[in-house]
Amino acid sequence: DHLSVLHQLECSGVMTAVKMTRETFPNRHTYEFLHDRYGPLFLQGDSAPTTTFGKEDSAASIKIDVQDGLRKLIFDKYGEKSYACGKTKVYFKAGILDQLETSRLEFLGRYATILQAHGRSLVCRNRFQTT
């Protein structure tokens, strides 16, 4: 039963399509989506873009900011073949978008901890001043 299903998938071309998708760029997103979702990552530390990030929201500036940010975040770690920039979308190889999402969650987790610490210190100071 299992072998017949695999044979049917191979004959119909599904297996070939899956192989091609895995070998190429299975994940793709628009520049605007990447700018909104991963923008804070582009601004952190030494990897901050040299462009006018966040000051101008035209499509051209968003595209430049995303390309510059991705170049500094992904290109250094995974190489130039890990993503490709098109006219309206950015295409990622398998696993690259997961790594980018992991970096985003770590980044947001650090800042959530900082905000929580400041909030708790404010509450403690207010309690101390009222007693």
Image: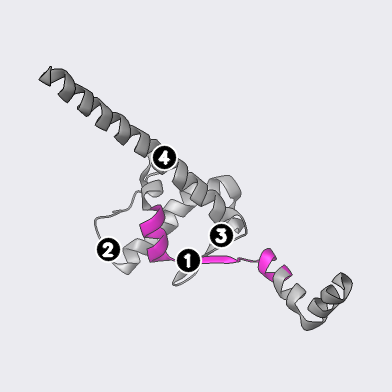
Rounded to the nearest angstrom, the CA distance separating label 4 from label 3 is 26 Å
- Look at 44% across and 72% down and name the residue there: 88
Secondary structure beneath label 4: helix
| Pair 4/1: label in front | 4
The mark nearer the N terminus, 4 or 3, is: 3
Q: Give the quadrant of the C terminus.
A: top left
Q: Quadrant of residue 65?
A: bottom left
Q: State which mark lies toward you, 4 or 3.
A: 4
For badge 4, the amino acid type reads Gly
| Pair 1/3: label in front | 1
Question: Which residue, given by chain and number where applicable, does mark 3 sit on?
Answer: 83
Residue 74 shows in this picture: no
The picture places residue 56, in percent across and down from the top left corner, at 25, 60
The amino acid type of the residue labelled 2 equals Asp
Q: Which residue is mark 4?
A: 109
- Does the magenta run of residues contain 21? yes
Disc 2 from disc 4: Cα separation: 27 Å
Q: Quadrant of residue 37?
A: bottom left
Which of pointers 2 and 4 lies earlier in the amino acid sequence?
A: 2
Question: Which of marks 1 and 2 precedes in the sequence?
Answer: 1
Are the residues flagged by discs 3 and 2 in contact, CB closer than 8 Å?
Answer: no
Q: Nearer the N terminus, badge 3 or badge 2?
A: 2
Q: Which residues are magenta?
A: 19-38
Helix, strand or loop at mark 3: strand
Asked whether 108 or 124 is in front, the reply is 124
Residue beneath disc 2: 57
Q: In terms of sequence position, does the residue under pointer 4 or pointer 1 come before the other?
A: 1
Task: Kindly report the distance in space between the C-alpha atoms of the residues bearing marks 1 and 3.
Answer: 11 Å
Rendered residue at 49%/51% (across/down): 101
Q: Quick one: label 4, few (<14), some, or many (20+) residues within 10 Å?
A: few
Residue that label 1 marks: 29
